[in-house]
Image: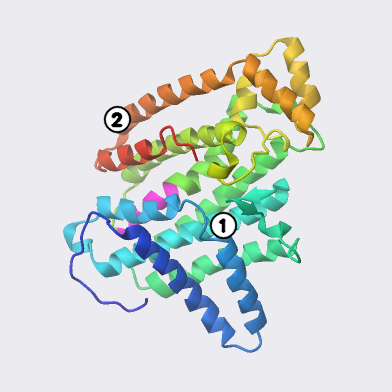
Amino acid sequence: MNGSNKKARIETSGDGDAAKFEEVYHTLVNEIITEDEANPEIADAAKRFRKMLDYNVPHGKRNRGLTVINAFRHLAQPDQLTDDNVLKAMVMGWCVEWLQAYFLIADDIMDQSKTRRGQPCWFRQPDIGMDAINDSFYVEACIYKFLKRHIRGEPYYADVLELFHETTYQTVVGQSLDLITSPESNRDLNRFTQQRYDAIVKWKTAFYSFYLPVALAMYMVGIENEESHRNAKTILLTMGHFFQVQDDYLDCYGDPSVIGKIGTDIEENKCGWLVVQALQRVTPQQRLIIEENYGFDDASKVSKIKELYRELDITSVYKAYEEKSYQDLMQLIENHSGSLPKEMFVAYAKRIYKRQK
């Protein structure tokens, strides 16, 4: 993959990007694993890491990674739309997917989750267990190997490195907020405020899932000014909040065969959007039901919480939120796009609006 000097402009529509993106994944894995397999001292570890990567990295929806490529196509000037540059965008797209896999492996251990992307969590595989912690470290380390190999000579290399480091920091802070707000051993509904929920979503999800992919493309095409990045961040962090509320709703009401996991926010005592909304609407007697049943890995207690959600008609609350938030997001795009293409943000918003997975 390294060293391509193609300068011919390619098609801007992005037709075939998903298939090419798949090919790039296998090329990246082969690059790093084949090199290590050739070293007899670490060949056994390399063989194991190949299996681990194939289990954890490529099976998501790939929205974050593909967004890097899509944003690049929206933002690039005609002379920037070369095969070589699109390939670099794909490499950085996979770096975002690798970052996602790193977070998810660790998050599943901390949450003691059961399934991820339609299969048992990695740490629940036979003979894996807590070895998955080291696996998550390896996944993150791969990101910087790929960036060094493929974009070290580019003027945006330092910006990209700083962005990945800063985004990782932000997400770790968000994860900490999530963990200290929702400890299963010390349940306290007073922590479940809208303000705390908004902070968790912003720091744990929105920076890496929405701002990071677009910011990478912006740096690729030479957009470095603070105003453009501030405008993009304003829109994309709001979009990330919208996305996470959807995720929380689907955790309770989504079809596991469609969303790829069994929802466990209630059992895990999560400060999720549904329980925050419920707490704003309950009577003292209904609050007692939440206190006695939320945060327990007990099917009967989970059922009582879901029954209370039905009594409070949380589904209608969500539908109203979804409609209003989408309209607010469209207005935000209108007001804050600045010199960035509005159609890019609108396309992303439409992609997640009323999603089912």
Q: Is residue 170 visible?
A: yes
Kindly identify the amino acid type of the residue bearing the numbered disc 2.
Answer: Asn
Camera-side residue of 187 and 50 = 50
Considering the whole magenta stretch, tell me its main secondary structure: helix
Mark number for residue 183?
none
What is the count of numbered marks? 2
Residue range corresponding to the magenta coloring: 211-220
Give the x, y percent position of residue 295.
75, 32
Q: Nearer the viewer, mark 1 or mark 2?
A: 1
Please state the horizontal and vertical placement of residue 238, each as a whole percent of the image: 44, 34
Tag 2's secondary structure?
helix
165 in magenta? no
The percent coordinates of residue 190 (x first, y second) are 72, 24
State yes or no: residue 214 in magenta.
yes
Question: Who's the residue at 45% across and 26% down the image?
Answer: 322
- What's the colour scheme? rainbow
Local crowd at mark 1 within 10 Å, few (<14), some, or many (≥20)?
many
For this rendering, which residue is in front, 108 or 232?
A: 108
Q: Quadrant of the N terminus?
A: bottom left
Residue at image mark 1:
101
Query: Which residue, given by chain and number where applicable, does mark 2 sit on?
Result: 335
For residue 215, above or below residue 253: below
Say whether residue 230 is left or right of residue 49: left
* Residue for point 67% across, 59% down: 122
